[in-house]
Amino acid sequence: MVQVGIIGGTGYVGAELLRLLSNHNKVKISAVSSTSYSGKTISSIYPNFYGINEIVYENEDEVIEKSDLIFLGLPSGLSESIVEKAVKKNKICIDMGADFRFKSETAYKKWYKKDFEIMDLHKKSVYGLPELNRKYIKEAKIIGNPGCYATSVELALLPLISGGFIEEKGIIADCKSGVTGSGRSLKEGSHFVNCNESFSAYKVANHRHTPEIEENLSSVSKKDVKLTFIPHLIPINRGILSTVYTTPKDKIDMEKLHEDYCKFYKAEPFVKVLPLGEVAKINNVRLSNYCHISLHYDEENNKLVIISCLDNMVKGSAGQGIQNMNIVLGFDEKEGLNAVPAIF
Amino acid sequence: MVQVGIIGGTGYVGAELLRLLSNHNKVKISAVSSTSYSGKTISSIYPNFYGINEIVYENEDEVIEKSDLIFLGLPSGLSESIVEKAVKKNKICIDMGADFRFKSETAYKKWYKKDFEIMDLHKKSVYGLPELNRKYIKEAKIIGNPGCYATSVELALLPLISGGFIEEKGIIADCKSGVTGSGRSLKEGSHFVNCNESFSAYKVANHRHTPEIEENLSSVSKKDVKLTFIPHLIPINRGILSTVYTTPKDKIDMEKLHEDYCKFYKAEPFVKVLPLGEVAKINNVRLSNYCHISLHYDEENNKLVIISCLDNMVKGSAGQGIQNMNIVLGFDEKEGLNAVPAIF
Amino acid sequence: MVQVGIIGGTGYVGAELLRLLSNHNKVKISAVSSTSYSGKTISSIYPNFYGINEIVYENEDEVIEKSDLIFLGLPSGLSESIVEKAVKKNKICIDMGADFRFKSETAYKKWYKKDFEIMDLHKKSVYGLPELNRKYIKEAKIIGNPGCYATSVELALLPLISGGFIEEKGIIADCKSGVTGSGRSLKEGSHFVNCNESFSAYKVANHRHTPEIEENLSSVSKKDVKLTFIPHLIPINRGILSTVYTTPKDKIDMEKLHEDYCKFYKAEPFVKVLPLGEVAKINNVRLSNYCHISLHYDEENNKLVIISCLDNMVKGSAGQGIQNMNIVLGFDEKEGLNAVPAIF
Amino acid sequence: MVQVGIIGGTGYVGAELLRLLSNHNKVKISAVSSTSYSGKTISSIYPNFYGINEIVYENEDEVIEKSDLIFLGLPSGLSESIVEKAVKKNKICIDMGADFRFKSETAYKKWYKKDFEIMDLHKKSVYGLPELNRKYIKEAKIIGNPGCYATSVELALLPLISGGFIEEKGIIADCKSGVTGSGRSLKEGSHFVNCNESFSAYKVANHRHTPEIEENLSSVSKKDVKLTFIPHLIPINRGILSTVYTTPKDKIDMEKLHEDYCKFYKAEPFVKVLPLGEVAKINNVRLSNYCHISLHYDEENNKLVIISCLDNMVKGSAGQGIQNMNIVLGFDEKEGLNAVPAIF
């Protein structure tokens, strides 16, 4: 059994990693850290683990010591120094935050207000979208696990961008996410009364996943991909639905395009291209690592619309982290991720 | 007191009209009809009226007879013959469905699969968006009350289209509505378990409000306005939020644009343009006739985004119907519509 | 117009008072205070008031000065000194918190950990349940507005207790409330993700409304009424449903009992006793000042079950406060409270 | 691999069985039947299975033929003849409906309006509550899987009834369930707009799980256990919380009682007795086979309150069915049921 640790195990990402890893047959949770809850059991924060997992939060160094592979579930900007320590001891790191998602220091600096302090680590790191970078992930020591929205939009667009079918500029991603996306800490925006029976946009055309999407799609396109991205908050716990509006360079034959998508994702265990005429819905992917994609064409206005759905806590975060772990450790990629979506 | 009747008083629109008219000081509910519940009390279907309004459903003819003004809350295609009867008796009709929303028979026929059978009625009818047609509404005998999505998108775009500031083609309206929008009849899509904790698009680029929006904005623009419109279902009862993406013809000065919007809607009692930096949210307009509009600019991609929110059952339907009634009857336009939005 | 002020106008009760008073024809909001938001507009906290009510928060003294009647929406324990000041200036006070709900200092002290500091005020104050104390409210200078759960349980039981029909001991009140009941301040229990798709009990057999209910029902009964009261949190914004289990002293004739209830509440504008066979539901009273009551008998086990529903923010708080205001000022008791419940 | 079939695979119970069995390592789904969807794939009804399980609905006889063990997910009253056929062919049957839950034909007949038509089958059948009947389940050919509410209330009370600690009469079970409990068929009560933002009781003191609970607890007690049971509908998808009010025969020492509960359930893999002071909540057991129980004492009124929570679709139905299957087939009881509850 490979020993796996979690640094930052009190946030939603840490908790979801613990939940999913409990059903993984090839790894064992070695240790979990928390700065504020050190010495307490996990079930004192998340009573769903009561009587099932009574592991006690330790400190970072213990996690590094006891683990072969480490997940970091920390706020942006805190991962570099820990990753450095871990990598020196020859541990593999999967950073669930944004610190290792960027190749471009300029973009990272602009959006996250922080330099790459240990440049060497960033050179070694790989952006962990398996559908894009599987072969590099296999060899990686440091994996930057993608953002939830970024995963959703990139999976929607990869076949189009890769095929050069659409205008690279002027893409619109109108995205909608459940409230777990804003985390465990209390804030006005996730107070029940403020979001229940409501719906709103936030960080309009100003969300940090924008440059992440642009960098990755541009690297595929070899052209400068630009998008307007607006996230919205849905009063549900889990799930992201992205409605992505694109302008085809030529008239689209939908049968043909559908075939292209199916072919593109044929070998992918977790991406399902729906039959033409079907519409992707959040409740068909909840609690699973699957991403559903549906294709739609407004012929009169020549707009090609791609809808993609995933569970922001699974394929958009912890599940994708485990998928990356399976790849880097040479396991079956679906190990621990076999759950069928919970339709209700 | 003016006598007001409702034909089709068992659906959500009829019920909401009854709820709102209960607080109107200048009119009296004369009679309400229902084909399937004739002889029963309203509170037998809607127990919120229990002990408050124990009116008994009658038939259409009785409603026409007893009323000076009649609201029709019927499925599309059923209003013409009733309106003809009523107009002959010199009654004013406000049709809450789609039958009198179109000038173009071609568009109506294409989307609703039905001819204009009594052409003369359509010549006399007015599209009841007060912010667009107030002066015609004042004199109207037949008012076609706008669709909920159409109201939301048209109010978002009127100042832009009217000013000629944006490309008339390629507009994208990504709209989201609560479940009351799909009505009282039981269907898969509004079964609790199917929409709770989910989110999905429907009628992708194929919703009947598309031609309605296009016709009205084109009439303002004098050019052919075209949009891609995708509605989505939010697991809430009430409210529509529309995120409308447009391409400015020239670079936008947001301070100036905000001023233009404020000036455009200055005299409007129910349209509120939020300060720059604020974002329109559904829970700020619920249970009221207000529409909130916020303006956003993605300068890098030259996309101007307008977000508009309203309550689909009030400004998107029954409330707007009452506003039209107030206009045509010469009452204060806010009479019966003074409710402050219920923030929770 | 009577000048009405609100001290503590930033909490949910203050906001709801403002919303409801906006449609009151006999009073005018004179001033609203806030300690932390002094100088800011109400719409900066509650954007539903944007463009409708742009009143600016002032301080307590200004509110007292400018008002004939004052609502206090403060945390428990803070009202006495302000009420003293106001009463000296001959203002009427309606305290929305718990400070003036008790006759018994012992009970108050035990549950609220505070003495009656200005005993004289408590002697002058009246418990503001109109269905129980209308004649005293008419003459009151200080009104203690009842708790939301207490209103719900007392209205359910008043006819039974008053008729001496049930065992005074061993009553069980299993109550369920929406999340507005726990207020505007951020806390774990009202974080969206923690209550959405969940349901739980809290303060099990230890909620402060217990002694309030017991004191008032005992005063009616002349015997010592005792109940086990357990509140639960429903993932909705508004509404309380109480399921109250009682043991009849004699076999119950339900027709007769129903008649007794109807007679008891006959003159009450806001209490509706449903026909036998109907069941009270929260969505039939939302956004209104009505309380629905339904009666059920488990003959085999001789348990009489009363279900009562009301909106915790209206009849359970702000609406009842306005009802009390109407009584004490000699207005029509329904003034400003005519809203028909919003079924959706 | 044992071949497992499902008769009635289009309802929620069938779908949940399929979802859970997908992760079971010792059985294989042999066939699934549907009368109305025969010939169609499962994913045409439940798109969450799209690309994962494309099994095609067959007819009953094929299911019987191909399976060693058969789950029946049928409306009450339809199982007897199928079970007879299957048992003759030496197949094991687990009936998810009510037809084999009763020993007493009188009770069954009174509440389900149907005789035991093949008496011999009922003599052979076992009530499948593992915590009560594990040793009989091991040898059973026919298992009547318990009702969801019944499981919740019985697990709450077993240690008390078994210890003779409480009055056997006058028990009150105030239960609350999510909407999946009312099934996949469209009805007024599960129309989104009718239950969202609402809460209500139904079948007041008249629910069919009442006699089931009474029969099983009486069999443990050797006395006649009687309860008043009122179910309520929570606007959530999954989960039951039961608040059970009992009257202790003697004063309760809570430390001692807690020890008794822990001891009683010590060997049980799925029942967790929470530490004193904790309160059972639905979001700590969702999507899992666990049942959480918390104990509370209202000393002043001598009421002992037990709160139990479980997921109505898992421990309350499909999960318990699989637990029974594991027992009867001699597997590890937790096989396929290892999922940690999904806290969000």
Image (cartoon, coloured by chain):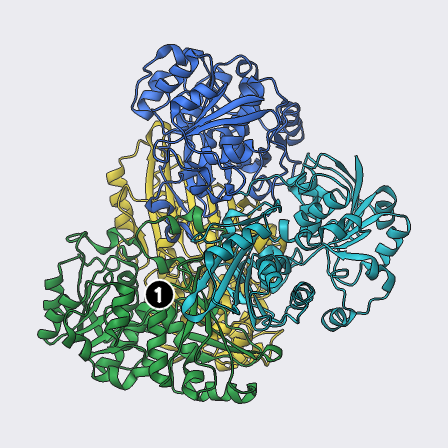
Chain colours: A cyan, B green, C yellow, D blue
As rendered, which of A246 and A316 lies closer to the eye?
A: A246
Label 1: element kind: loop
Most foreground residue, B24 or D188: D188
* Quadrant of the image occupied by residue A80: bottom right
From the viewer's side, name the closer residue of B21 and D139. D139
How many numbered dots are placed on residues in this image? 1
Quadrant of the image for the N terminus of chain D?
A: top right
Could you tell me the amino acid type at mark 1?
Met
Q: C334 or C234, which is in the foreground?
A: C234
Question: Could you tell me residue B50's position as x and y percent?
Answer: 27, 55
Q: Which residue is mark 1?
A: B313
Position of D122 relative to D149 (above/below): above
Determine if residue D305 is in view.
no
Residue at 21% x, 73% y: name it: B27
Is residue D257 shown above or below C276?
Answer: above
Q: Is residue A278 above or below residue D4?
A: below
How far across and down, in percent of the image, does residue B307 sit? Answer: 49, 73
